Image (cartoon, rainbow, N blue to C red):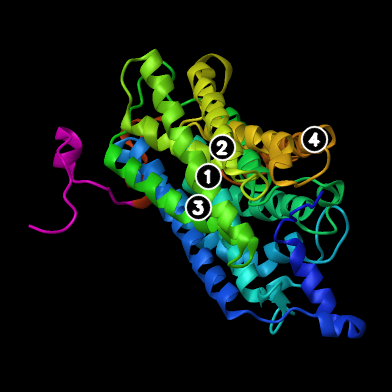
């Protein structure tokens, strides 16, 4: 069978070809069309983090909307710098089975190099966007009770010590999961499973919000949720199709599957809502499509469109029922990060092993499924235990949780000395008009 390899393999392949005199004739050449697509894809993935900020912000209380959104926004600056300093090199530098070396610290040695047919600087920027949103995803579990400074410190450590090594395991030719044949085209294991389990651990370490689960925590602005979901879907086209590292047939398949899987997942979520409560909701539609995007991410270039639809349906169903039982079984993951990203990521990774045969990818089905299972367990264990250790270390430097008074009154004023809405609007719940007369 022919295996479509994850895009990061091309990094060291391209560099080794350039550095080898005997292979110089076969060295890839820069393709301006592929480069243009990758520049656009990187920009699309960048947009996903502000989209996530809107999505999370709409789901929280009005008095904590800015703090919730800032946890995503600060990830842009924090991880953007850390990726350049060391994150990229730890993920994609030459090294052993566990992490890369620091030969590319500060992005040294990338000038003039190619990854596939695009400049390696473009590949590094594209991958930076992945690292950024992985950190931002975790914040949804700890909103309305975690100190902003504590989150920033944890996020920086997590990006360097959890995300980058895991990316090396799965996407670097030196990584042990890559050598084992694990399939993760665009980050189901590296991003969503790791962020999902890390979010669950963080929610457990912090403890539940005051009044949980007796107090109802309703979304304060559903239109913001829909806007965020739309931006996420738009950006996800670059997230998945861009991982082909070129404007080619692999990108076309990933693009199509990124359309049909979340569409099916949205319908599944609305169907479950209608069956249980009788009313399909806008928040449910937004959540369902995001879950479908998560589920198809590891498989998007390895399965056929009909298999993508099945992946969306099963991913949404698993996540929906996880949300229904979370009050009895799980910590207070405020915005259901584990249910929507961790669970859907696990389902997508395992279904990749079962359905990759539909495009002739991977090993024989039983063998590929077991390889996927190993990668899922490894990601859960590494990210879960690692996050617990990092949170405990951070708590030695700064308290993790805000005071009860700050939690009750809302996070915005205490953390940022500003509010998303005026006091009049906060009191009356009046609509907010942005711009115009």
Image: magenta residue range: 417-437
Left or right placement of residue 324 versus residue 342 in this view:
left
Left or right placement of residue 317 versus residue 115 in this view:
left
Q: Where residue 40 appears, x then y in whole percent?
A: 49, 68
Q: Which residue matches tag 2?
A: 341
Q: Look at the numbered disc 3 and give the secondary structure of its residue.
A: helix
The answer to whether mark 4 and mark 2 are in CB contact below 8 A is no
> Which numbered mark, 4 or 2, is in the foreground of this view?
4
Q: Where residue 32 appears, x then y in whole percent?
A: 58, 80
Q: Residue at x 82, y 59 (%)?
A: 173
The answer to whether mark 4 and mark 3 are in CB contact below 8 A is no
- Decide whether residue 12 is among the magenta residues: no
The crowd level at tag 4 (other Cα within 10 Å; few <14, some 14-19, many 20+) is: some
Q: CA distance from mark 3 to mark 2?
A: 14 Å
Q: Using the image, tell me which numbered label, if any, was put on residue 365.
A: 4
> Which numbered mark, 1 or 2, is in the foreground of this view?
2
The answer to whether mark 3 and mark 1 are in CB contact below 8 A is no
Q: Residue at x 60, y 35 (%)?
A: 342
Q: Look at the numbered disc 4 and give the secondary structure of its residue.
A: helix
Q: Which mark sits nearer the N-terminus, 4 or 2? A: 2
Q: CA distance from mark 1 to mark 2?
A: 8 Å
> Which numbered mark, 3 or 1, is in the foreground of this view?
3
Q: Which residue matches tag 1?
A: 137
> Which numbered mark, 1 or 4, is in the foreground of this view?
4
**Could you say which quadrant of the image residue 372 lies in?**
top right
Q: Residue at x 47, y 61 (%)?
A: 44
């Amino acid at each position: 069978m022919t295996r479509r390899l994850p895009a990061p393999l091309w990094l060291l392949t391209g560099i080794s070809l350039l550095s080898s005199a005997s292979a110089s004739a076969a060295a890839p050449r820069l393709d301006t069309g592929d480069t243009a697509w990758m520049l656009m894809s990187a920009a699309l993935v960048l947009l996903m983090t502000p989209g996530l900020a809107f999505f999370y912000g709409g789901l929280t209380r009005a008095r904590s909307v800015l703090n919730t959104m800032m946890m995503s926004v600060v990830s842009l600056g924090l991880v953007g710098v850390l990726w350049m300093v060391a994150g990229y090199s730890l993920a994609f530098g030459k090294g052993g089975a566990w992490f890369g070396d620091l030969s590319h610290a500060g992005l040294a040695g990338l000038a003039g190099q190619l990854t596939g047919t695009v400049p390696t600087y473009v590949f590094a920027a594209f991958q930076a966007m992945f690292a950024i949103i992985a950190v931002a995803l975790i914040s949804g579990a700890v909103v309305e009770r975690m100190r902003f400074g504590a989150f920033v410190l944890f996020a920086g450590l997590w990006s360097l010590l959890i995300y980058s090594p895991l990316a090396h395991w799965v996407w670097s030719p030196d990584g042990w999961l890559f050598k084992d044949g694990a399939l993760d085209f665009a980050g189901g294991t590296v991003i969503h499973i790791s962020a999902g389990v890390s979010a669950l651990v963080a929610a457990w370490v912090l403890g539940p919000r005051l009044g949980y689960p007796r107090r109802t925590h309703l979304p304060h602005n559903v239109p913001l949720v829909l806007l965020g979901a739309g931006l996420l879907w738009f950006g996800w086209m670059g997230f998945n199709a861009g991982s082909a590292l070129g404007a080619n047939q692999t990108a076309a398949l990933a693009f199509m599957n990124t359309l049909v899987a979340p569409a099916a997942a949205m319908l599944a979520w609305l169907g479950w809502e209608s069956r249980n409560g009788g009313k399909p909701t806008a928040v449910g539609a937004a959540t369902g499509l995001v879950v479908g995007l998560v589920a198809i991410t590891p498989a998007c270039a390895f399965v056929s469109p009909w298999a993508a639809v099945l992946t969306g349906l099963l991913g949404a169903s698993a996540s929906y029922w996880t949300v229904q039982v979370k009050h009895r079984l799980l910590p207070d993951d405020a915005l259901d990060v584990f249910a929507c990203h961790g669970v859907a990521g696990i389902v997508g990774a395992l279904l990749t092993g079962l359905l990759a045969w539909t495009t002739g990818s991977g090993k024989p089905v039983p063998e590929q499924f077991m390889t996927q299972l190993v990668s899922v367990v490894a990601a859960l264990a590494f990210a879960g235990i690692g996050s617990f250790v990092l949170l405990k270390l951070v708590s030695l430097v700064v308290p993790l949780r805000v005071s009860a008074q700050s939690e009750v009154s809302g996070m915005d004023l205490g953390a940022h000395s500003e509010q998303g809405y005026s006091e009049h609007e906060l009191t009356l719940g009046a609509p907010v008009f942005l711009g115009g007369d």
